[in-house]
Image (cartoon, grey):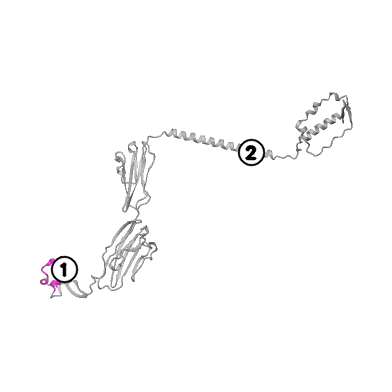
Amino acid sequence: MSLLTTVLWVKIKGCAESSVEDDRSVALRPLALMALKLVEVLKNRDSYCIGNFQILLILKQLPDFTRSLSITTPDQMIEKAKGETAYLPCKFTLSPEDHGPLDIEWLLSPADNQKVDQVIILYSGDKIYDDYYPDLRGRVHFTSNDLKSGDASINVTNLQLSDIGTYQCKVKKAPGVGNKKIQLTVLVKPSGTRCYVDGSEEIGNDFKLKCEPKEGSLPLRFEWQKLSDSQKMPTSWLAEMTSSVITVKNASSEYSGTYSCTVRNRVGSDQCLLHLDIVPPSNKAGTIAGAIIGILLALVLIGLIVFCCHKKRREEKYEKEVHHDIREDVPPPKSRTSTARSYIGSNHSSLGSMSPSNMEGYSKTQYNQVPSEDFERAPQSPTLTPAKFKYAYKTDGITVV
């Protein structure tokens, strides 16, 4: 315990002029220096007058906590890139008056003020509890193995955008209590940057050079450079050298070359390359005419293919219909064997009706008129009943039935 001085300033009307301290500059001094001065001059007095003010010096027996628990780490702001590890310091000192158990608690106040403070890690009763907050489970750890040594700092690994917020370190060892706040901001490095030309790279044309990162936290800064030839950017482009888009007007062949675009933010940078080749203007009329002719030829070819396929299908359909067409009103065709038999039978009948006098003019070639294959082919029936004739006669030694 130590003595603390309480100084009361009271305005009164009857402060004697003779009681005014000769060193009037003491009234202009800071309060702390004033108090020390008063302690010196009021060894035998309990009041002091300066101008129209009377100062009452009161000495009280008050406890002095200046040597109790205190956190030496100041409040601060930390910026880190996504995926990195953030070190959040929290160092403290203890005094002999602090006799209670040591408790350390880290809380997170998310950037979304609608959410309540979350305990992310706790040290109590010589045990560590780090599974309070699911979003940080397995990613938050104390950096010291001996927390009683005065280091309650933590590491947050594999930072995510959801980790943004205010982290508060609370240390308690009764009767001492202390706390500090750290503002953590997680930024995304520029990445996946793409450089390309928006337009036709022809002499006399207008187009744009674009530099677009796939991701990256704002604000972003851009820087264009020419890497080939004279390595000097066209004068008309200088105003847009720090922009993501460069507008090119009335392009010339001098603009050809390799360009780089570097995009940066507070936690990182990324770069892309662009090859610009300015060529003479093409014959657009000839290109259009050739395209039209090609389209017409393609249409004609498609038409021919469709016509041929349709014709072939019709022919196949007709052949199938003819092959399977059976008419009920048409008798079946006679076989060649039946025709040959009828022919021979009719000749026999004719011979039977002839007289011997008519036989002389009959030629054997009439029998030869029957086709040989039909004549020689065996009948389909197993037996053939011979024809019966009413007349029989003999001529030239041959018996005709």
Locate residue 375, reporting x and y percent. Answer: 78, 32
Q: Is residue 326 left or right of residue 31?
A: right
Residue 177 numbered tag? none
Locate residue 9, reporting x and y percent. Answer: 18, 71
In this rendering, is residue 175 above or below 305? Answer: below
* Mark 1 and mark 2 residues within 8 Å of each other at the beta carbon: no
Task: Indicate the quadrant containing the C terminus: top left, top right, bottom left or bottom right.
Answer: top right
Q: Which residues are magenta?
A: 18-42
Task: Tell me how far mark 1 sits from mark 2, CA to CA.
Answer: 122 Å
* Residue linked to disc 1: 34
Amino acid beneath label 1: Met
Q: Main secondary structure of the magenta part?
A: helix
Q: Quadrant of residue 168?
A: bottom left
Which element carries disc 2, helix, strand or loop?
A: helix
The residue carrying pointer 1 sits among few (fewer than 14), some (14 to 19) or many (20 or more) residues within 10 Å by Cα, namely: some
Q: Quadrant of residue 101?
A: bottom left
Amino acid beneath label 2: Glu
* Residue linked to disc 2: 316
* Residue 40 sits inside the magenta stretch: yes
Locate residue 323, reporting x and y percent. Answer: 68, 39
